[in-house]
């Protein structure tokens, strides 16, 4: 650490003190954007694979799971961040899991009360979200280290990234597997549905092709910058 | 076929936990680079699945009858502490096995397959015998999927693969093919 002068310069009220050696102050927009793009939970980090695959056979299920996860991420991020100084290091994982499980139960009950049909279609996969590595990962890696505002922003960004990935996957699968979106017929009566896409192998294949496409784009961009250099 | 035998066959093949039900995918993609570790992880998982089946059955029968809304929270606490106790017991009495399992033992806590077993066992109203057979079937199915994936990935290591497919994309496409093979068992029927 850099030596701190014994006499602190007087700071104007409200201005944040710049401590040498600390990381540059991150903006809230960066906290949100990181979850959507650079560290996208599904497409980059491969977290929360079980709900991703299991519920993306229809767009409605995908949106419900995405929004529920967003709610849990924001809620648990806020609580973990608020209590970060009171939770002992030894029992932190158990505490985080309990906080997450509480919010997942809340989300499960709210969904069952508002959209009973979707709640029935998701079945045990909604409470299974407790074991979603993304939730525990964000609590441990981010929310436990920063203030409540940044924790909520991060939870919102990660939740948005998760929801967008689920929407991408579930829209593709429902459109090709049933010719419809949100139960509205899109491709017309002459379209023969690819039933394969709404079945389990279709889930693996859709994400696999999305990842291959992403890798192709990244690789092409890398080659272009190499040629330019 | 008797009910118990049918639950076993159905869990291992028709509704394979990993390839058809999408449970335990994190370990399926994360630690299947070598067949040796795949076997060990499958063994550890089967053991914890058995413990969980008994624990979840006891909770459902004796504790949670009046408070079903606490089910998720109660299950995850029991699984977390169960894994912790297993870890301590294995460390004390089977130090060799403990060194072999290494990090995989604590990682099991956040494995969706374990919580999934408890939740599906509840929603299907299994009794203790059925739950135990369900757990063994789930463990065998999980180990089978891990071993299949690991042996294919060991071959890919030495194969010439296009640059864009060197990471997860190809693994997911292979998983899709494996899953498709397991869909062939669907003709045997579904869980009663």
Image (cartoon, coloured by chain):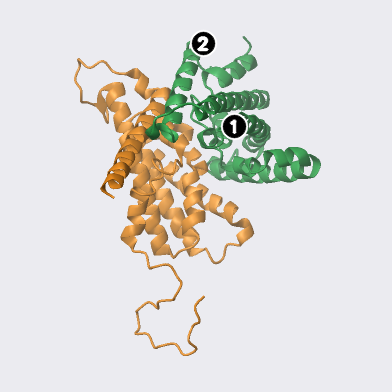
Chain colours: A orange, B green
Q: Position of residue B60 (x, y in %)?
A: 62, 35
Q: Position of residue A37 (x, y in %)?
A: 33, 48
The residue beneath circle 2 is: B188
Q: Does residue A67 appear in the picture of this structure?
A: no
Q: Nearer the viewer, residue B140 or A103?
A: B140
Tell me if A34 is positioned left or right of B14 in this view: left
Q: Relative to A98, is A51 above or below?
A: above
Outermost residue toward the right?
B93
User: Mark 2, residues whose alpha carbon is within 10 Å: few (<14), some, or many (≥20)?
Assistant: few
Please state the chain letter of the residue tagged with numbered disc 2 in the rendered image.
B
C-beta proximity under 8 Å, tags 2 and 1: no
Q: Earlier in the sequence, mark 2 or mark 1?
A: 1
- Helix, strand or loop at mark 1: loop
Q: Position of residue A76 (x, y in %)?
A: 46, 54
Badge number at residue B34: 1
Q: Relative to B17, is B62 above or below?
A: below
Please state the chain letter of the residue tagged with numbered disc 1 in the rendered image.
B
Residue drawn at x 48%, y 30% as measured from the top left: B22
Residue drawn at x 50%, y 60% as measured from the top left: A144
Q: Relative to A155, is A28 above or below?
A: below
* The quadrant where residue B172 appears: top left
Residues marked 2 and 1, same chain: yes
- Helix, strand or loop at mark 2: helix
* The quadrant where residue B48 appears: top right
Tell me if B110 is positioned left or right of B36 in this view: left
Tell me if A97 is positioned left or right of B166 in this view: right
C-alpha gap between disc 2 and disc 1: 32 Å
Report how many numbered discs are placed on residues in the image: 2
């Amino acid at each position: 650490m850099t030596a701190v002068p014994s006499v602190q310069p007087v700071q104007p009220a409200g201005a944040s003190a710049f401590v040498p050696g600390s990381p540059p102050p991150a903006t809230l927009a960066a906290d949100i954007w990181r979850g959507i793009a650079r560290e996208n939970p599904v497409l980059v980090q491969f977290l929360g694979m079980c709900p991703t695959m299991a519920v993306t056979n229809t767009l409605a299920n995908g949106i419900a799971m995405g929004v529920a996860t967003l709610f849990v991420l924001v809620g648990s991020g806020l609580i973990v961040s608020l209590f970060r100084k009171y939770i002992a290091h030894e029992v932190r994982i158990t505490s985080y899991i309990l906080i997450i499980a509480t919010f997942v139960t809340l989300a499960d009950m709210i969904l069952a009360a508002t959209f009973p049909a979707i709640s029935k279609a998701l079945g045990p996969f909604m409470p299974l979200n407790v074991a979603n590595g993304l939730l525990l990962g964000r609590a441990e890696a981010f929310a436990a280290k920063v203030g409540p505002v940044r924790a909520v922003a991060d939870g919102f960004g990660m939740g948005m990234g998760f929801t967008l990935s689920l929407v991408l996957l579930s829209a593709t699968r429902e459109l090709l597997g049933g010719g419809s979106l949100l139960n509205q017929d899109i491709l017309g009566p002459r379209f023969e549905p690819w039933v394969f896409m709404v079945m389990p192998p279709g889930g693996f294949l859709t994400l696999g092709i999305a990842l291959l496409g992403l890798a192709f784009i990244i690789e092409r961009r890398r080659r272009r910058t190499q040629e330019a250099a | 076929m008797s009910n118990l035998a049918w639950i076993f066959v159905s869990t291992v093949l028709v509704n394979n936990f990993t390839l058809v039900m999408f449970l335990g995918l994190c370990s399926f993609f994360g630690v299947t680079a070598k067949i040796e570790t795949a076997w060990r992880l499958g063994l550890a998982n089967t053991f914890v699945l058995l413990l969980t089946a008994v624990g979840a059955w006891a909770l459902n029968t004796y504790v949670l009858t009046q408070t079903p809304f606490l089910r998720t929270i109660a299950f995850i606490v029991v699984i977390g502490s169960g894994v912790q106790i297993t870890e301590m017991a294995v460390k004390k009495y089977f130090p060799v096995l403990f060194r072999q399992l290494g990090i995989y033992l604590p990682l099991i806590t956040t494995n969706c397959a374990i919580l999934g077993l408890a939740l599906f066992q509840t929603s299907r109203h299994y009794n203790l015998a059925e739950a135990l057979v369900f757990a063994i079937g789930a463990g065998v199915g999980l180990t089978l999927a891990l071993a299949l994936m690991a042996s294919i990935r060991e071959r890919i290591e030495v194969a010439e693969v296009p640059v864009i497919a060197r990471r997860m994309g190809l693994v997911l496409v292979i998983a899709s093919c494996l899953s498709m093979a397991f869909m062939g068992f669907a003709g045997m029927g579904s869980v009663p």
